[in-house]
Image (spheres, helix red, strand yellow):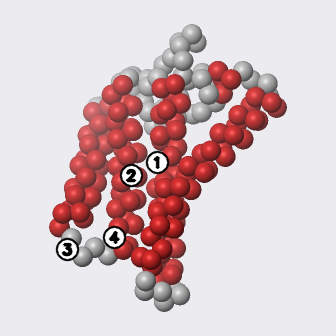
């Protein structure tokens, strides 16, 4: 489950500890399931790049989404290994840079997954509805939509969050970003 113990307003962290005693071996199954997903996604990406003689454009879009999912899973595993009980449990005197970096990474890759799904939907719509068989010409536009739109959303979110929490609620900067 996702939880945060940081001293600022972002709420992202990974915990693989056992709170419910009925869930025997939860931390182990958390790591095993993440590793299975990482291995499967890595094999899918490698098989796409090594085994395909002529790659379909829609398969290339799918591989971008698989990479975004793989990066999200890697963030989960790395963060769970940094602190197995509670990620980024920071004393009030310490800096929050770890929690900020982790929140940005998870936020970005989650949004990238959804924007790559949107990109695939737009591609299929152009092929099926508009009968445009040459969608690969728009690869740069799809690439910018899939990887660039999450950057824009996060940038706007952090500007709005900073303005709201700093100027409206009067919170100090170390409570907002660290």
150 left or right, relative to 9? left
Q: What element carries label 2?
A: helix
Of residues 143 and 96, the one nearer the viewer is 143
- The residue at which mark 3 appears reads as 53
Mark number for residue 69? 2
* Residue count near mark 2 (Cα–Cα under 10 Å), binned few <14, some 14–19, many ≥20: many
Q: Earlier in the sequence, mark 2 or mark 3?
A: 3
Q: Which of marks 4 and 3 is nearer the N terminus?
A: 3
Q: What element carries label 4?
A: helix
94, above or below 130, in the image:
above
Q: Quadrant of residue 85?
A: top left
- Cβ–Cβ below 8 Å for labels 1 and 2? yes
- Cβ–Cβ below 8 Å for labels 3 and 1? no
Mark number for residue 109? 1
Of residues 96 and 34, the one nearer the viewer is 96
Q: Earlier in the sequence, mark 1 or mark 4?
A: 4
Q: Earlier in the sequence, mark 1 or mark 2?
A: 2
- Cβ–Cβ below 8 Å for labels 4 and 3? no
- The residue at which mark 4 appears reads as 59
């Amino acid at each position: 489950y996702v939880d945060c113990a940081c001293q600022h307003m972002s709420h992202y962290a990974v915990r693989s500890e056992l709170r419910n005693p009925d869930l025997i071996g939860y931390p182990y199954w958390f790591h095993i399931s993440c590793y299975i997903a990482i291995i499967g996604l890595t094999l899918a990406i490698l098989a796409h790049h090594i085994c395909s003689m002529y790659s379909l454009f829609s398969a290339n879009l799918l591989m971008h989404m698989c990479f975004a999912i793989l990066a999200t899973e890697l963030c989960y595993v790395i963060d769970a290994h940094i602190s197995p009980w509670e990620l980024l449990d920071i004393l009030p005197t310490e800096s929050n840079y770890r929690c900020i970096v982790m929140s940005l990474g998870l936020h970005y890759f989650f949004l990238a997954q959804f924007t790559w799904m949107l990109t695939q939907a737009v591609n299929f719509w152009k092929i099926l509805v508009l009968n445009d068989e040459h969608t690969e010409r728009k690869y740069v536009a799809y690439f910018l939509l899939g990887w660039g739109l999450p950057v824009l959303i996060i940038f706007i979110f952090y500007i709005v969050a900073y303005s709201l929490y700093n100027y409206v609620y009067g919170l100090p900067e170390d409570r907002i970003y660290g």
